[in-house]
Image (spheres, rainbow, N blue to C red):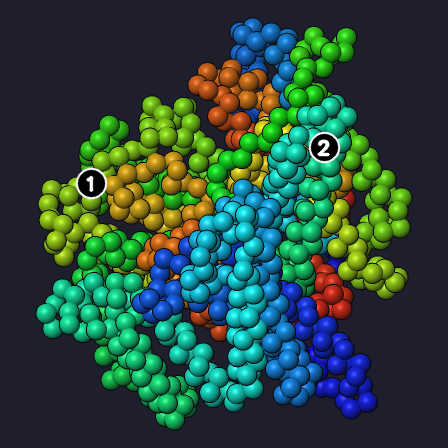
Amino acid sequence: MRTTLRPRRRPSRTETAFEAAVSAFLWAFRILLVLLVVVGSILTLSSGKFDLETWVDLIVNGAVQGGIYALIALGYTMVYGIMKMINFAHGEIFMIGMFAGYFTSVILDDAGILNASPLASVFSFLLMMLIAAIASTLVALAVERVAYRPLRNSPRLVLLISAIGASFFLQYTVAGLVGPGIFRYPDIDILEADVSLPLLSAVGIKWIEVVVIVSALVMMAVLYLFVMRSKIGTAIRAVSEDKQTAALMGIDVNRAIVTTFAVGAAMAGAAGVLYGQLWGQVNFYSGFIPGIKAFTAAVLGGSGNIPGAMVGGFVLGEAESIGSLLIIDGLGVPSPGQLKDVIAFTILVMVLMFRPQGILGERLSRSRA
Amino acid sequence: MTAGSTAGASLGVARGWGAWKQVIIVGLLFAGAALYLTLVGIVGTFEERDVIEDVVTVGQGVLLLTAIAAGYAGARKAPAGATNIIIAAAVTGLMAGAALSLLILVGPGVGLRDYLPNASPDLYNLISGADLLSVENTRDMWRGDAFPTTFWFPALIGMSLGTLGGLLSLLPRFVRNLIIALTMALIVMGLFASIVRSPMLQHDLTSGLARELFASNGLRGGGVITVVGLVLLAYLAWVLLKPAQRYRALPPETRQHPALVIPAGALLLLFVLLLPLGFTGFIPSVIALVALYALMGLGLNITLGLAGLLDLGFVAFFAVGAYTVALLTSVGDFGLGWPFFMAIPFAILAAMGFGLLLGLPILGIRGDYLAIATLGFGEIIAILARSDLLKPFIGGPAGITNIPKPLASIGIEVGPDSWLAGPNQIYYISLVSIAVIAFVAVRLRDSRLGRAWVAIREDEDVAEALGINLVQTKSLAYMLGAAFAGLGGAVFASLYGSIQPSSININVSILVVTIIIIGGMGRIPGVILGAIVIIGLPELFREFAEYRFLLYGVALIMVMRWRPEGLLPSQVGRQEMHHEEGLTMEGEGSGPPSAATTDATAAAGTNGGA
């Protein structure tokens, strides 16, 4: 039951030598990391190697990437909130959205619609996102039905392993169906063009970047309203809070859970199209790393916390984008871009270690240590 | 399963309709499964291998079995009555076949191959029976230029085989099991034919026999007769003499009597020791690899099986061990040229050190989060291994090469034909390590520390309240797991003679976890069986390799669903995994029981997909 209030460390017990050593080690670890960040930043900034334009560029990139992370993270966080499970296959749901968008785009391109006129392009892109959202939702519901629902009352580790199984099944199913190669998204000309508005043209932002940020924000706003205002959204929150009481109040727990999966998957699918169009390519493995990073974003914001996932996504995007140049380059590491992913995973471990409730606090943090 | 079997007279009609709806759902699931198997490429890939030479390939067999299974599953859902059962079976079989008919009708016309490359003319030829019926002008048909005249073929075959599956369900259990056993035996022997054949051909005594029984690819007529005969005999013996029941009926003193146990153990030991000597070619290295993964599985078994810590960053310590040995023993650019056996302790120590270093910060984290955090570690190590940052020390993407085999590193050169050739050295080193780990694991399990691990796995809060130091106990488990992972990496580097960052990826961790889960958590024979199934089969049958992770994914889900304790579980593990809160890290409330509906239709879907 979720009533025990358990402090992280018990001050009353005397610490053994081992525990003292551990806490000394952890402190040294923290200090070392802070030192690395500070020294790296100072060295980079004082070297003056990068001008303002580079930084603005990085910040924009971070926001774009962060928007996509946030969209995926919402699925993780909502499912975590309602089922207390890590949906390991969520990255693959995102990847399926990428592929659905890719195939839609190729078909539209073959039909000559994709770049026929600006209006046709906009319509095509919306259609891609819609089809991707539908495809992802269908797959997510199937996964939920086959791999998660029968295990709802099993130990968490059993659910996680089943989710890992689902993740690998989806990855290699896609690899088997379409082949293991890399597929190039057809270009959409109006999205590749630079923005020619007075303020933005100076920094050279592409339309696709604007589209990603705006659609991410719009989708998040819609989701937020859906969860806070709609009847089923209220049901989802109630079930997240307390499954048994919600069931006693006449809420259809099953329907709330299925809706959660569907909504999360739809967001991930749409995010897949944004991601695919942004980077221009897709592969059966494309969902795995973004999936883990989005999970990091969800943890960073506070698992089960919807605004937290949004904030976490943007923070992670910026940290990755700026961090590799600001911190790692300053330390004299060759090709700092290679270590971009290290930042995300380090943040994940750091947050889990030092602030497991995340930036905005885990909404249900009472129940766990 | 619910409807139909208990149909009362008054409710017969209503229940009948419900049952027919279920039958249709089963049919749809199997139609999906048939399409999935063809389009994902399994059927096409396994076309290369025969079960029976020139009669049936594994690829065809998969489709035929799908149709039979569809009929059988349909029959199980049908309303009572033989007629109903046969009709239901025919309908589900027809639906599975009709899905392929639809593929033949629609696929070529819409250019499906542009999107799904497996929808190739070869596949269409196979499923439409064009080869069998010697249809002309198939090329036009599969370009979409001509009407595919044999589109009815899979539907007809599906319906016939579905009916057969339905009949199968009407047979008494005794006969049905015999037919299933025969089919399985034929498939297994067909698969193993080429592997059994090559050593037999080398001796004059057996070479003639080998030619009679086995083709280079599949069974010959003689082989089929032999397999059928042997299975019949074995089955009759099994049913009539009931050896398993008799054995179980024996009192424990007799079963564990030294006169019985010692010869059996000695035979087993002899078999294990001589195993790689019976083979030539690539098979000894497969055996060595199986032993290596069994060793790593046993290592992770301490972390996951005993202490309940799901470590997805296993590959990080594997990498540390591999690179340590590479650096110390390589006679190439980065190495010191040490003897292998001197480098091993350092590899283990380095991995343990890393285990402690990485473990301490995260061991306060709850179970499922720990899994993801360790996954992050694995990725960090992989990124570092191929980064330019460490390139001057460990070679970047090219890795470290020229790692000598263990004996070569101490100056003993053995020829490739010697019984101590490269892979066999690795095999025996792995065997010794397995023995050591198994001993350590058994001793630890029954020790104070082992009981503390089990307590933590069961309930952290209670364990802590009982005075168990969580961080200390957990970090010991984590370090031991890391040590064995490091040993595994060290042996791996020596087996392949080089180590590259491309070998350091999440799939290694997943493989080892899968071995433990499939084999049975916490038990040594289970882990070894898991290693044979998970590593051995795909290495022996290259066709599996492409789909191994797909099949493992299915296997993980199925095992978690129906047998979470694994194939060869321990008694305790069985009780734990079926207990609702067995492995949770804290007392999280479980949902209302109504949510725990298991559903047979979804089950049928997973079966079909596998």
Q: Does residue A190 appear to the left or right of B163 in the view shown?
A: right
- Whether residue B363 can be seen here: no
User: Could you tell me how many numbered marks the image carries?
Assistant: 2
Q: Quadrant of residue A288?
A: top right
The residue closer to the viewer here, A79 or B464, is A79
Give the residue number, with chain letter if any, for mark 2.
A124
Q: Residue at x 44, y 65 (%)?
A: B133
At a point 84% along the width and 43% down the height, the residue shown is: A226
Residue type marked 2: Ser
For label 1, the crowd category at 10 Å Cα-Cα, with few meaning under 14, some 14 to 19 and many 20 or more, is: many
For residue A223, side relative to residue A326 (left or right): right
Q: Residue at x 82, y 35 (%)?
A: A221
**Picture quadrant of residue B292:** bottom left
Percent x, y of residue B411: 11, 42
Q: Is residue B141 visible?
A: yes
Image mark 2: chain: A
Residue behind mark 1: B404
- Image coordinates of residue A293 in percent, x first then y, are 60, 36
Q: Amino acid at mark 1?
A: Pro
Relative to residue A191, is residue B506 drawn left or right?
left
Q: Can you say whether A99 is above or below B581 in the image?
A: above
